[in-house]
Image: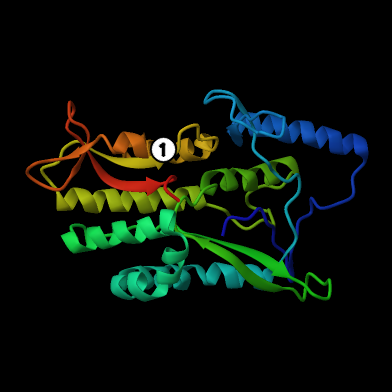
């Protein structure tokens, strides 16, 4: 659950959520913006007009953030946290039922959206017909929730799931930094903070590293293996993605390369096995993929 929230007995709240003067608020905005720049809560800068066009890969600005943590009912938070694994298992089981999924569950959507959903279904059927090569899968999933409070009381609010992202699950790294920023800005130590720990960045990196190690056991003769991150051209969320790249390399020794779908379309598979060659000159192959494109 990637939310900048905080914790107390019945309500997830924080000592930071107090009334402040305009002068103190301006000072807090300045400190928060500096913290973002210092620790990399950044996104690609965009035009300030209605087009919001990206200004280039190297021009950055603070990512949208909140000055204070958001009050959140403890019970709702704990429910969302505990539902993480069951939802993950459910998604995995649904995806494993290929015939039902492709022929019954989303056939109406595919017919109504032939250019995108229809093409995805056709591609899935084509891959299924060729036979499954890889039996191991890794899912990086993100559930998004909102509170439903018809009577206006946060304490009596119920938790509603907005969506469950199964592709391009972003902001794992930036959200972890936002939690650290809230603690730093409002004088809370890691030990005494009422904010729940947010280690999404470490968790995602650990999962990818485990998948990478499993791939190496499957193909022990492949000496030059990398995780490929499938990205969009002109990606403005590259810092969140780069953070993951750096954690993988420094903590687990796992290399990550960035490729667009267009670039991957020019790659080839080896002739002696189904591995995808990312760089024929160095014999670099893909040992896993994290999709931030194609959705």
Q: Is residue 250 left or right of residue 124?
A: right
**Up-down relation of residue 40 to residue 1 (above or below):** above
Against 213, residue 234 (above or below) is: above
Asked which colour scheme the image uses, the reply is: rainbow
Above or below residue 27? Residue 219 is below
Residue 280 horizontal/vertical position (percent) = 18, 30
Which quarter of the figure has residue 2?
Answer: bottom right
Residue at x 38% of width, y 47% of height: 290
- Specify whether 205 is left or right of 47: left
Percent from the top left, x then y, of residue 207? 37, 54
Asked whether, in this view, residue 73 is left or right of residue 17, the answer is left
State the residue at coordinates (79%, 54%): 15
Residue depicted at 59% across the width and 30% down the height: 54
State the residue in front, 274 or 210: 274
Local crowd at mark 1 within 10 Å, few (<14), some, or many (≥20)? some
SS category of the residue bearing label 1: helix
Q: In the rendered image, which quarter contains the N terminus? A: bottom right
Q: Which residue is mark 1?
A: 245
Q: Is residue 102 visible?
A: yes
Taking 203 as reference, is 74 left or right? right
Residue 87 image offset from top left, x and y in percent: 47, 70
Estimate the x, y position of residue 202 in percent, counting from the top left.
Answer: 46, 49
Please report the residue visible at 8 percent of the width from the left and 41 percent of the height from the top. Answer: 271
Of residues 22 and 120, the one nearer the viewer is 120
């Amino acid at each position: 659950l990637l939310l900048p929230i905080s914790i107390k007995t019945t309500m997830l709240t924080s000592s930071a959520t107090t009334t402040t003067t305009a002068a103190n608020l301006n000072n807090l905005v300045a400190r928060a913006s500096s913290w973002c720049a210092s620790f990399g809560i950044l996104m690609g800068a965009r035009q300030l007009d209605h087009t919001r066009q990206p200004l280039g890969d190297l021009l950055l600005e603070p990512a949208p953030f909140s000055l204070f943590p958001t009050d959140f009912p403890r019970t709702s938070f704990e429910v969302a946290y505990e539902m993480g694994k069951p939802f993950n298992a459910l998604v995995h089981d649904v995806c494993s039922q290929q015939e039902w999924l492709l022929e019954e569950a989303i056939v109406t959507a595919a017919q109504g959206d032939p250019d995108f959903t229809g093409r995805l279904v056709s591609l899935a059927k084509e891959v299924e017909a060729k036979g499954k090569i890889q039996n191991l899968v890794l899912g990086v999933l993100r559930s998004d929730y909102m509170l439903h409070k018809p009577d206006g009381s946060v304490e009596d609010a119920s938790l509603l799931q907005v969506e469950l992202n199964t592709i391009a699950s972003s902001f794992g790294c930036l959200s972890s930094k936002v939690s650290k920023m809230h603690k730093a800005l409002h004088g809370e130590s890691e030990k005494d903070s009422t904010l729940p720990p947010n280690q999404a960045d470490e968790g995602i990196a650990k999962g990818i590293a485990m998948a990478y190690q499993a791939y190496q056991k499957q193909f022990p003769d492949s000496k030059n293996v990398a995780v490929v991150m499938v990205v969009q051209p002109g990606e403005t969320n590259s810092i969140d993605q780069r953070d993951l790249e750096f954690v993988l390399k420094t903590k687990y020794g796992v290399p990550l390369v960035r490729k667009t779908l267009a670039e991957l379309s020019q790659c080839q598979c080896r002739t002696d096995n189904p591995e995808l060659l990312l760089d024929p000159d160095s014999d670099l192959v893909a040992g896993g993929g994290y999709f931030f494109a194609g959705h």
